[in-house]
Image (cartoon, grey):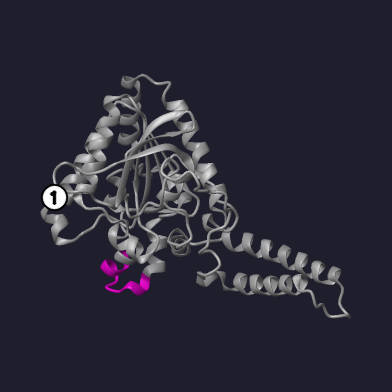
């Protein structure tokens, strides 16, 4: 089994995905969420008092319940205020939250009868990219996804989601297989970028990504992509060409990471916030610039607070997009995709 994958439903029938909260959400603190964390701790302490058998004789259960209700209402108001005003740098931090659902979680929850396929038949099996046949809703499809890994062991095995050339060649080979059988392709994008190491460059990293972009642009089956976390540079584009591209509300998508941009422009990583704002990397920015087609709203407070709801929304959007795209004949599909790609990057100058 892939080291980044826990058992899939067809491999272990006892696996469940009913949890609505991530095990990481309470143990990892974002800097801008500290007031929320303090409030959550107060609520937790009051709930413990309420549940304790030995209550203070002078205090009734109703007093505790009323106080908890008020604190929860304040928590919701504060949460909504914070997440309605997130800047680019804070959005990047949310996208990297360790409790955020990853591709393996979406595959487990949304893809039925998933059968993973390995290897590129040239060099090896890059564990940073998962490929396989499955069914999303009523649609049989090929799933191609980045894989970051959860714990340290998985992250090292998956190279932290930074794919090598063999990963992109594996992805393209499986996409060609899907085209052969007339099946649509669904990609889940979550990578800080393609791996820039010496070995990757020697094996043709840039060429592999460029070939993928070219070949994906002319595949004669529907292509749907979702940026679920990080969409970094060519690493994202290597599986990111699609007829419909969506982003989760607090994901980011850019030509370069804000840290790398800061180090290049200002010779220091300390300007990360400034770089993030300049890059226009949020979902709202990308929608305005025409690089994506849709923004999928996340639950209040981000996907890490309610992974199940997030996964259900993505499954619904993918099913709807596939249903619409499968109505087009292959020639019309290719023409629409070509027109869409050619329209990107057009600038109108005003005097």
| Of residues 221 and 50, the one drawn nearer to the viewer in this rendering | 50
State left or right for residue 317 relative to residue 347: right
State left or right for residue 19 relative to residue 156: right
Magenta part of the protein: which range?
A: 261-271
| Of residues 220 and 123, the one drawn nearer to the viewer in this rendering | 123
State left or right for residue 176 relative to residue 340: left
Location of residue 257 with respect to 143 vertically, above or below: below
For the point 33% across and 61% down, the residue is 155
Residue 143 is a magenta residue:
no
Q: Position of residue 112 (x, y in %)?
A: 45, 37
Secondary structure of the residue carrying numbered label 1: loop
Location of residue 171 with respect to 339 vertically, above or below: below
Residue at the extreme left of the image, as rendered: 202
- Quadrant where the image shows the C terminus: top left
Q: Position of residue 189 (x, y in %)?
A: 37, 48
Q: Characterize the local packing of mark 1: few (<14), some (14-19) or many (20 or more) Cα atoms within 10 angstroms.
A: some
For the point 83% across and 80% down, the residue is 56
């Amino acid at each position: 089994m892939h080291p980044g994958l826990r058992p899939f439903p067809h491999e272990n029938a006892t696996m469940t995905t009913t949890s609505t909260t991530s095990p990481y959400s309470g143990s990892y603190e974002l800097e801008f969420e500290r007031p929320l964390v303090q409030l959550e701790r107060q609520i937790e302490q009051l709930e413990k008092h309420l549940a304790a058998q030995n209550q203070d004789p002078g205090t009734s259960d109703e007093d505790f319940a009323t106080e908890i209700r008020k604190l929860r209402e304040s928590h919701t108001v504060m949460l909504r205020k914070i997440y309605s005003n997130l800047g680019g740098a804070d959005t990047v931090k949310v996208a990297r939250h360790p409790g955020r659902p990853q591709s393996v979680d979406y595959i487990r929850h949304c893809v039925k009868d998933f059968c993973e396929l390995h290897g590129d038949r040239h060099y090896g099996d890059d564990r940073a990219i998962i490929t396989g046949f499955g069914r999303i809703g009523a649609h049989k499809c090929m799933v191609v996804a980045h894989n970051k890994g959860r714990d340290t062991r998985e992250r090292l095995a998956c190279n932290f989601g930074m794919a090598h050339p063999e990963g992109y060649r594996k992805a393209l080979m499986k996409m060609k297989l899907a085209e052969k059988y007339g099946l649509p392709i669904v990609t889940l994008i979550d990578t800080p970028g393609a791996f820039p190491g010496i070995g990757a460059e020697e094996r043709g990293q840039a060429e592999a990504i460029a070939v993928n972009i070219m070949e994906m642009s002319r595949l004669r089956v529907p292509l749907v992509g979702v940026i679920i976390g990080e969409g970094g540079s060519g690493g994202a584009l290597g599986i990111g060409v699609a007829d419909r591209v969506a982003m989760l509300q607090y994901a980011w998508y850019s030509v370069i990471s804000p840290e790398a941009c800061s180090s290049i422009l200002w010779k220091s990583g300390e300007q990360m916030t400034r770089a993030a704002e300049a890059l226009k990397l949020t979902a709202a920015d990308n929608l305005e610039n025409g690089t994506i087609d849709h923004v999928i709203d996340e639950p209040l407070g981000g996907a890490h607070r309610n992974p199940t709801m997030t996964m259900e929304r993505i499954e619904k959007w993918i099913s709807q997009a596939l249903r619409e795209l499968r109505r087009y004949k292959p020639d019309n599909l290719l023409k629409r995709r070509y027109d869409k790609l050619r329209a990107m990057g057009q600038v109108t100058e005003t005097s």
